[in-house]
Amino acid sequence: MCVGVQWCFSQVKGAVDDDVAEADIISTVEFNHSGELLATGDKGGRIVIFQQEPESGNQPQCRAEYNVYSTFQSHEPEFDYLKSLEIEEKINKIRWLPQKNAAHFLLSTNDKTIKLWKISERDKRPEGYNLKEENGRYKDPYSITALRVPVFRPTDLMVEASPRRVFSNAHTYHINSISVNSDCETYLSADDLRINLWHLEITDHSFNIVDIKPANMEDLTEVITASEFHPNQCNTFVYSSSKGAVRLCDMRAAALCDQHTKIFEEPEDPNYRSFFSEIISSISDVKFSHTGRYMMTRDYLSVKIWDLNMETRPVETYQVHEYLRSKLCSLYENDCIFDKFECCWSGNDSVVMTGSYNNFFRMLDRGSGQDVTLEASRENIQPQSVLRPCNVSTGGKRKKDEIGVDSLDFNKKILHTAWHPLDNIIAVATINNLYIFNDQLN
Amino acid sequence: MFAKGTKRKFSDPGEEPALGAELGPVVRPLSSTYSLQRQSLLDMSLIKLQLCHMLVEPNLCRSVLIANTVRQIQEEMTQDGTWQIMTQALAAAQCPADRLVATEVLCRPSEALAAAQSPKPLPAGPEEEEEEEEEEVVVAAAMEEDVDSEANPLSSSSFLPAPFGAEPGWEDEEDDSEDEDSEECPSDAEDVPDSRRGDQVFGTFEIKHPAPPPDPALEELFSDVDPSYYDLDTVLTGMQSTPKMGPYDLLDSLSPHAAPALSTGTSCRSDLNELDHIMEIIVGS
């Protein structure tokens, strides 16, 4: 992406009214490897998959048109009888498997259980059964006088989602990440204290590869916040912590990867030391670049790009909403300081994107060093209307078209964003709406 | 800025450095503002740790981060010496009920006072209106206090077990706080900084003489309250092992004692309000 790219509104999905049903809160957004499918998970345990409409020659700029492809209930609420606690059905993460045949596969997880779903199309159906009528009722056997071979006839397209595997009972704590390995055979799941390695075909056991649970829970001071496999090296994965460190592990080194191979941590700036320093250093998301050379981390106020060859400090640091630094105490009071923002790379790794408050999201261009703040709002939903940059004023004097820090709506947060792997199409989730934007073709 | 209309307490860039602000490597000033803010942050953090979700397991990451914040404050207060004072005050308590007796005394209508003068009708100020749903006994106490302080400041200081303002160990206390405190209903949290109330509670402990006889009803009521409230390890472990422990569990454990505790004769409007009141006492906010 070069300087001066404009982003345009394409679509918005979800309810219009301000009264948000709890179950409709979007909890994860993910494109598949081709970008043709876009999956969202919500707090009610449902998954909605959108499919990109094929480009029509008439309107090439409407390439970012996605329509509902499949909707299904992935997880149901459960009850842990031993602890007398409810297990939420909220979908924490969705990860697509690389496509191998006509069907699509994805992994979805809630706090405790991971499921492998097969999404397949059916556009033919068998007709001409001997024993059954067309409506399914069984024929009277005495009425059958001849036999025929049933044939497949075309029918309306049906998309079916069926659970193929259920991976359960492996996590004591809440699962925060899943990541499919580049070998396409295994995947990892991470909770607050442990990371497990699974084989996609085997559901009754998994291997524990990281365990940071202390012998005495009173000594617990650090938890795992995110984890991901390297995109190319099937032996390498990283996990981030609540203390702002990222550990890279090599599974060839040992069966249990408690000893990290590398640790990426930036020393704290003593000028910024406060009681909230640790909380805002907690990493909420970690993502490898597509090339696998770099890694991005998101903490409360910034995005950092790390070169895997240098552990001492990031190569790039971008401020997301530095104006919140003086408001940390209030944000602690209302719990906003614990919000977990995600981040994502553009297809060519030249731009990174992350969300903020007031339905703002930030695009950070690594090449030019420029950044822009855009807003996902229903006020600006004319087809292909260009998004205007937003500015937050920090000083006393507020310029025209600027919004003051105290006017920001902290209930409107963009935690989940996704970028099409091959095109400049982005999906931005507000609390209960999904916005799709594309760049303006010149 | 924040939906619930929470009063912003730390937004003075021109004054003492706020807790969220960069303090730098210099030695932190032990100003009263800073100490108050720090105490308030400590109390806020402890409330966050205690009030877990009832049905769903609490977020471990959030709990760990809050617990680490409390540890940090604890360490700093230990270096300052203020932590020692606070724990000594707690240790000096004969039983947990003492801590709450100190403020309960504020609520208890004074027989002497009642005999001396008839309570004047109190105009319903904004404080009273806010606390409409609070227990009547608390409101009654406020009326008593107001009457008390208006009529005779000296008698109010003798009535209260310890002079709030005359505590030498407390840097935060000021001499003119006495009048201000005695006028207030303890349930009114709006105008007084959190730590000030905390200081009141612990301040009464330091020189509690003569110790008022512990009310057996109150003792029973608060026998479940753990003085290790400020003990972080207990909080964290307790939270882990009994994740369901929350306001409603506390309520359950209190219910058999609810009636005798309010032996002043008034009845609670609702158990939940009583719980809020108790929490306020414990936390001192």
Image (cartoon, coloured by chain):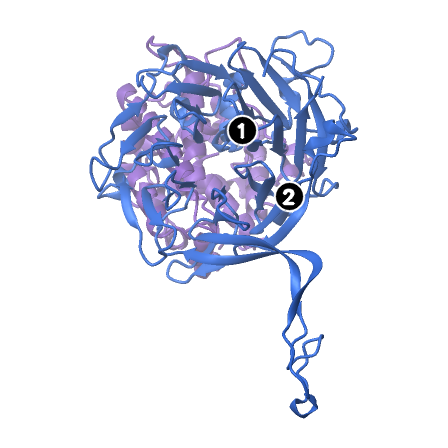
Q: Is residue A22 visible?
A: no
Instruction: Specify the subunit that label 2 lies on.
Output: A
Which residue is under mark 1?
A: B152
- Toward which corner of the image does residue B158 lie, by quadrant? top left
Discs 2/1, front: 2
Do the dots labelled 2 and 1 sit on one chain? Answer: no
Q: Nearer the viewer, residue B32 or A195?
A: A195
Q: Are marks 2 and 1 in contact (CB under 8 Å)?
A: no
Counting other residues with Cα less than 10 Å from the Cα at mark 1, is it few (<14), some (14-19), or many (20 or more)?
Answer: few
Q: Chain A hue? A: blue
Amino acid under label 1? Asn
Residue A6, how many percent across, how many down?
Answer: 68, 18
Q: Is residue A139 left or right of residue A295?
A: right
Residue B15, how many percent across, how many down?
Answer: 50, 10
Work out which quarter of the rendered image holds the C terminus of chain A and state it: top right
- Res. A117 mark: none
Q: Is residue B171 left or right of residue B14?
A: left
Q: CA distance from mark 2 to mark 1?
A: 75 Å
State the SS at label 1. Answer: loop
- Res. A50 mark: 2
Amino acid under label 2? Phe
Q: Is residue B57 visible?
A: yes
Tally of marks? 2
Work out which quarter of the rendered image holds the N terminus of chain A and state it: top right
- Toward which corner of the image does residue A122 lie, by quadrant? bottom right
